[in-house]
């Protein structure tokens, strides 16, 4: 009898253990191949609703490098960017958990890496293509994506590529119709723009691109963003962060963000199911939300 009860107890524990693992691992694919297959519409960064991890890549190239002091300042700007996104999400009933190595302590130190290159990178198109290829190669060889995804229980990862020099920030997004091609979604963030320090609002703008936010200052007919629509956004949502990253005084603040995420961007991110502008301006509603598809 005791032996039978022992066997039953062990069997029960085994079942509970299996259920527990299934529950906690529900957000992480088992292999990188499975991850890419399951998320080939989203790319590496999924919808901005649950947990996402940012992997930071500090680039030390031919004519620039990162000191601990400069890293600390960059982390402060990124910290403000992340907190802005989280605060904005709450206004629309979303509660994404965003983790990155931008806080005090070493809790997320495994999410930061250093890349060395003997090439000098700039924001010119040829250089950005080379840099993206370099980044993809580095990720595949050195970043333990499966371990990170399993540890943090998420399949949503955005890459922040940081350069300690002047340049125009931009983001490489994954296009759904491209399948597994260019799966890693990366924001290329420069520390300066011309002679001034780049600000947290610019970084937040680029990071939102990773999750499907569209630029609202330039025409994109496939998304329904016409000159007429841009004029409408300027009039009704002048503080929209995807329209401008400048403050009310038309200056770039280093840490503080005075911009807003309007219902327009909330719609593209998937925070709002519908908005009156969708039918009025024939805005494209990506399926699923938070994705990019240049074939429309």
Image: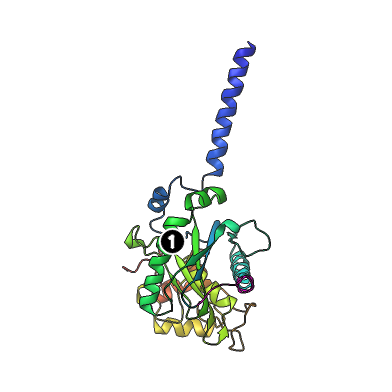
Q: Which quarter of the picture shows residue 228?
A: bottom left
Image x and y of residue 99, in percent? 59, 59
In this view, the residue farthest toward the right is: 104
| Residue position marked by numbered label 1 in the rendering | 138
Given residues 295 and 8, the one toward you in this image is 8
Describe the element under mark 1 as helix, strand or loop. Answer: helix
Q: Residues within 10 Å of mark 1 (few under 14, many from 20)?
A: some
Q: How would you classify the magenta stretch by its main secondary structure?
A: helix
Image x and y of residue 123, in percent? 43, 79
Q: Name the colouring of the figure.
A: rainbow
Image x and y of residue 57, in percent? 51, 65
The quadrant of the image that shows the C terminus is bottom left
Q: Which residue is at a point 64% across and 77% down the rendered structure image?
A: 255
Q: Is residue 105 above or below residue 277?
A: above
Given residues 73 and 69, the one toward you in this image is 69
Q: Which quarter of the picture shows residue 293?
A: bottom left
Q: Is residue 209 left or right of residue 13?
A: left
Q: Which residue is at a point 58% across and 18% down the rendered structure image?
A: 7
Q: Which residue is at a point 58% across and 88% down the rendered structure image?
A: 250
Q: Is residue 156 left or right of residue 130?
A: right
Image x and y of residue 87, in percent? 63, 67
What span is in magenta?
64-74
Q: Is residue 262 visible?
A: no
Q: Which quarter of the picture shows residue 139?
A: bottom left
Q: Is residue 217 magenta?
A: no
Q: Is residue 104 visible?
A: yes
């Amino acid at each position: 009898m005791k032996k039978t009860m022992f066997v039953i107890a062990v069997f029960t524990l085994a079942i509970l253990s299996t259920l527990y693992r299934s529950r906690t691992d529900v957000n992480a694919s088992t292999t990188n191949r499975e991850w890419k297959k399951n998320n080939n519409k989203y790319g590496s960064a999924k919808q901005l609703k649950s947990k996402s991890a940012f992997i930071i890549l500090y680039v030390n190239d031919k004519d620039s490098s990162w000191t601990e002091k400069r890293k600390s300042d960059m982390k402060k700007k990124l910290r403000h960017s992340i907190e802005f996104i989280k605060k904005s999400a709450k206004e629309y009933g979303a509660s994404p958990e965003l983790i990155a190595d931008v806080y005090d302590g070493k809790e997320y130190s495994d999410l930061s890496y250093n890349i060395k290159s003997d090439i000098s990178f700039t924001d010119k198109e040829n250089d950005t293509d080379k840099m993206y290829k370099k980044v993809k190669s580095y990720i595949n060889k050195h970043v333990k994506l499966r371990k990170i995804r399993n540890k943090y229980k998420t399949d949503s990862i955005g890459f922040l590529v940081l350069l300690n020099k002047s340049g125009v920030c931009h983001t490489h997004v994954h296009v759904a119709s491209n399948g597994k091609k260019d799966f890693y979604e990366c924001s290329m963030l420069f520390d300066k723009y011309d002679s001034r320090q780049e600000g947290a609002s610019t970084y937040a703008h680029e990071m939102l691109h990773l999750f499907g936010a569209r630029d609202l200052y330039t025409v994109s007919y496939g998304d329904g963003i016409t000159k007429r629509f841009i004029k409408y956004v300027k009039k009704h949502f002048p503080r929209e962060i995807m329209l401008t990253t400048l403050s009310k005084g038309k200056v770039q603040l280093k840490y503080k963000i005075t911009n807003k995420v309007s219902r327009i961007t909330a719609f593209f991110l998937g925070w709002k199911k519908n908005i009156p502008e969708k039918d009025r301006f024939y805005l494209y509603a990506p399926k699923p939300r938070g994705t990019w598809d240049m074939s429309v």
